[in-house]
Structures are given as C-alpha cells and as structure tokens.
Amino acid sequence: MNPSLVSKKNKKLFLELDYLYAELDYYEEGLKEAQDEFKEAFYEYSKANNLGYSKPEEQKLETSSDTTLSTFVEEDDEEPTGYSHQPPPPEMTVEESVEPEEKDEDISKLFKKIASITHPDVIPHSEKEELKQKRIQQFMEAQAAHKEKNWYKLCQIAISLGIEIPEPKKKHLKWMEGEGKRIRERIEHIKITFAWVWYNEEEEAKKNNIMRNYFSAIAPKN
C-alpha cells in the first residue's frame, strides 16, 4: 500500500473509531439504565411468582442463603453451569481486553511523550488543581491504552496535549482495525443481553416472556 493510501485509510479509521466509541458510549449507558429497570422487574416477578429472590433490604441479616441479585446476566452462548439458588455471577460478559503481543517502539515512544507531560511526578506543584487532575486522568488513560495496545486512544490523548503523532504505518492500521472489531463485538453483545432486549421491548406480553426465559436460564439444571 502506497503512503498516500495508508494516510487516507488512517484518516478513515480514525473517523470510524470516533463514531464507534460514541456508539459504544450510548450502548454502555443504555445498558446501565436497562439493568436498573430489569432489576426492579426481576424482583417484582420473583415476588409475584414466589421464586425466592428478594431485594437486599428485605432480607434478614441472619439469613445464610443469599438470594440477592446485584447485576444481570449478559447472555452468553453457553448455558449456565452450577447453581446455588442465586443468579449467575456479575457481568457474565465477553468484554475482551487486547493483550499486547509484543512491545512496540511506536506505542512506547508515544506513551513516554505523553507521560513526560502527564505523569504526577512531573506536574508542577504550582499548577492549578483542576489541570493537575486532568493531566493525571490523561496519564491513567494513556497507561491503559499503552497496556492494551490501543493506538487510537494513545493518539487521541497525544493530539489533545499538542504532541505530534508519527506518520501512519500499516501496523497502525491493523491495530485500529482490531480495536474497531472489538468495539463492534461489544455492542453486538450488549444488544442480545436479557436486560437490553427486555428494556427495548414495547409489548408487555413479550417483556413477561423475556423475564420468564431469564428465570429459566438461571434455574438449576438437572
């Protein structure tokens, strides 16, 4: 691929990731709201059908069998295994972190440039507290991006600090394509969770059916 095409594809991938991160933010926030409402409906359904799950504040402190539900299952491909009269563990999710295959010079160099401005030890004591906290937050985000090999995030932080980013290379494009794939998978995963499907269903009969299916999914397997 000639340098001109690499540059154009790099620009295209940056724009795509801008959109995908905005979309992911919408789905993540929507999922939290869906889980909160699903939680309330879960306890109501349990009470109406004598299924034994009760809100934490309604349980006696001395009880030994925990039937609380803190978060809600994000539907997995496999059926739940094991049962102790409580729902599956929190966040049964396939949210994958990208493990760095090897250290890369471009990522390490860019991270070091960011750290030279944002690391808590290099921020002047005379700096305003608000800016200090912003720089520390940027450092923490850059540290996470460096660990996850998230080239897009590192570049975004560098740009916000006025740091010049390197000329795009094919390996940078590959990293960003991988990040785009991860975000799309996360969004698709959210869209098939019980909480999300239930929350976005308008017909009451179908909502009840979804809740019934959820209870069936967490019931003991013989």
Image: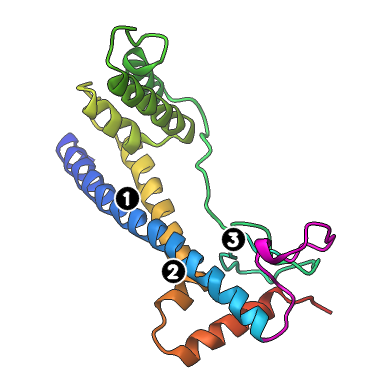
Residue name at image x 45 percent, y 60 percent: 32
Look at the image and tell me in which quarter the N terminus lies: top left
Q: Mark 2 belongs to which amino acid?
A: Lys
Q: How far apart are marks 2 and 1 (CA)?
A: 16 Å
Pointers 2 and 3 in contact (C-beta within 8 Å): no
Q: From the viewer's perspective, is 53 left or right of 133?
A: right
Please determine whether, in this image, residue 24 is positioned above or below residue 54: above
In the image, is 97 to the left or to the right of 184?
Answer: right
Q: Can residue 206 be seen in this view?
A: yes
Magenta range: 49-67
Q: In this view, does 56 lie to the left or right of 101?
A: right
What amino acid type should be assigned to the residue bearing mark 3?
A: Thr
Answer whether residue 185 is visible to the viewer in this image.
no
How packed mark 2 is, by other alpha carbons closer than 10 Å (few <14, some 14-19, many 20 or more), is some
Q: Residue 177: x, y in percent?
A: 35, 47
Label annotation for residue 71: 3
Q: Please say whether residue 114 is one of the residues in the magenta stretch.
A: no
What kind of residue is marked 1?
Tyr
From the viewer's side, name the closer residue of 58 and 22: 58
Which mark, residue 191? 2
Write down the residue under mark 1: 21
**Residue at point 46% right, 70% down?**
196
- Could you tell me how far apart the alpha carbons at marks 3 and 1 are, in whole angstroms? 24 Å
Q: Nearer the viewer, residue 125 or 105?
A: 125
Q: Marks 2 and 3, Cα distance to the nearest angstrom?
A: 16 Å
Sequence-wise, the earlier of marks 2 and 1 is 1
Percent coordinates x, y for residue 113 in the rendering: 32, 16
Quadrant into which the C terminus falls: bottom right
Q: Closer to the observer: label 2 or label 3?
A: 3
User: SS for tag 1?
Assistant: helix
Q: Which residue lies furthest to the bottom in this view?
A: 205
